[in-house]
């Protein structure tokens, strides 16, 4: 009986948290987020498009994903030393406000080079069909065929993202340095990808518009 009650308490707590976050998302204020986001511009650009490949583009990203990342960094569930101090005092509502601001910006339109057609073909194969021989599912299943992501599932948009950042993210998931995807799904997938696979997917999604 005690185990059952404990399980019910955990379930009810998770439901309550989900409802609370839904309320915060509904109340998200992009104008307030714009003010808070002024400190983000140095790395991510005034409009959420970074000039440096090591920093991700945020413009047009799924709001739920951005809010989760901010709160995960704040709470220590994702380690990003450059950001930890900047978001340490953020409330959950602050996180949603900033997320609303960047989500409302025009997404980056990336362009890939045709110099390595074989690499891009491999990237397209992995993105659209996966590689069942390696146990790698299609990226499009979670990130959609057009790369816009799924907000309700907290799956991020990938379209137009810097290849350098995407590669470093996949490497972090593969090594276990980053574990904050739902059920560590990305850790399982990335660990099955070769360096060439990561490079291929990263370059393909850069030009996926």
Image (cartoon, rainbow, N blue to C red):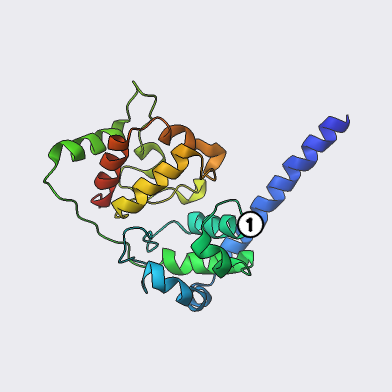
Total numbered labels: 1
Task: Quadrant for the N terminus, please.
Answer: top right
What x and y, as percent, mark residue 124? 24, 38
Q: Residue at x 19, y 38 (%)?
A: 119
Horizontal arrangement in the rendering, residue 202 relative to residue 18 (left or right) = left
Can I make out residue 127 in this image? no
Horizontal arrangement in the rendering, residue 53 relative to residue 169 (left or right) = left
Residue that numbered label 1 is attached to: 75
Horizontal arrangement in the rendering, residue 164 relative to residue 142 (left or right) = left
Q: Residues within 10 Å of mark 1 (few under 14, many from 20)?
A: few
For this orientation, the residue located farthest to the left is: 115
Q: Where 182 falls versus 71 (above or below)? A: above
What x and y, as percent, mark residue 192? 40, 29
Q: Where 77 falls versus 145 (above or below)? A: below
Q: Residue at x 35, y 39 (%)?
A: 140
Kindly state the secondary structure of the residue where label 1 is placed.
helix
What x and y, as percent, mark residue 196? 27, 36
Q: Residue at x 47, y 32 (%)?
A: 188
Determine the image quadrant of residue 133: top left
Determine the image quadrant of residue 145: top left
For this orientation, the residue located farthest to the right is: 1
What x and y, as percent, mark residue 190? 41, 36
For this orientation, the residue located farthest to the top is: 133
| Towards the viewer: 60 or 183 | 183
Determine the image quadrant of residue 95: bottom right
Can I make out residue 2 in this image? yes
């Amino acid at each position: 009986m005690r185990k059952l009650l404990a399980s019910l308490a955990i379930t009810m707590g998770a439901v309550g948290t989900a409802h609370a976050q839904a309320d915060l998302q509904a109340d998200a204020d992009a104008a307030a987020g714009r003010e808070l986001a002024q400190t983000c511009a140095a790395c991510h650009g005034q409009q959420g498009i970074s000039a440096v490949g090591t920093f991700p583009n945020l413009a047009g990203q799924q709001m739920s994903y951005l809010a989760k990342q901010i709160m995960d960094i704040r709470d220590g569930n994702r380690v990003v030393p450059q950001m930890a101090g900047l978001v340490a005092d953020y409330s959950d509502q602050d996180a949603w406000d900033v997320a609303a601001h960047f989500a409302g910006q025009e997404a980056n339109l990336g362009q890939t080079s045709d110099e390595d057609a074989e690499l891009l073909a491999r990237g397209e194969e992995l993105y659209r069909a996966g590689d069942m021989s390696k146990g790698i599912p299609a990226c499009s299943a979670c990130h959609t065929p057009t790369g816009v992501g799924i907000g309700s599932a907290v799956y991020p948009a990938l379209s137009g993202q810097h290849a350098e950042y995407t590669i470093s993210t996949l490497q972090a998931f593969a090594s276990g340095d980053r574990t904050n995807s739902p059920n560590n799904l990305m850790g399982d997938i990335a660990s099955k990808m070769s360096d060439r696979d990561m490079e291929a997917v990263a370059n393909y999604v850069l030009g996926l518009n």
